Image: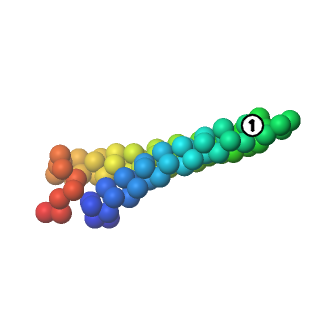
Amino acid sequence: MIRTQVCWDATVRVVAGAAVVGVGLVAAMALFRVPLIGWLLALVVAVPASLFGVFLAVKGLWLVVEEATREAIDGQPRSDLLTDE
């Protein structure tokens, strides 16, 4: 993969993960106000949204680590992954 593609993919995954967690928690707070089964509905929304959001963020960070490791093994470490030289 080209370095810029890896960086953009990682950035999108981390931001999307944070957005999924945020939207899931806001939806869970809204559902928590439903009488009787609100707490159950909130858990049904909050837990999967949080898990999926964290998964996306970790996958994005893993892409950065993987690319840096690949460069270190090749013997050409770079501090700036956004250049295509």
* Residue 49 on image: x %, y %: 62, 46
The residue where tag 1 is placed is 33
Apparent side of residue 55 relative to residue 28 in the rendered image (left or right): left
Amino acid type indicated by mark 1: Arg
Tell me if residue 71 can be seen: yes
* Residue 58 on image: x %, y %: 46, 44
* Residue 46 on image: x %, y %: 66, 41
The N terminus lies in quadrant: bottom left
Residue shown at the point (60%, 42%) measured from the top left: 26
Residue shown at the point (23%, 47%) measured from the top left: 72
Tell me if residue 75 can be seen: no
* Residue 45 on image: x %, y %: 69, 45
Callout 1 crowding tier (Cα within 10 Å): few <14, some 14–19, many ≥20: few
The C terminus lies in quadrant: bottom left
Q: Nearer the viewer, residue 21 or 4?
A: 21
Q: Nearer the viewer, residue 69 or 55?
A: 55
Eyeballing the image, is 71 above or below 34? below
Residue shown at the point (86%, 35%) measured from the top left: 36
Apparent side of residue 68 relative to residue 52 in the rendered image (left or right): left
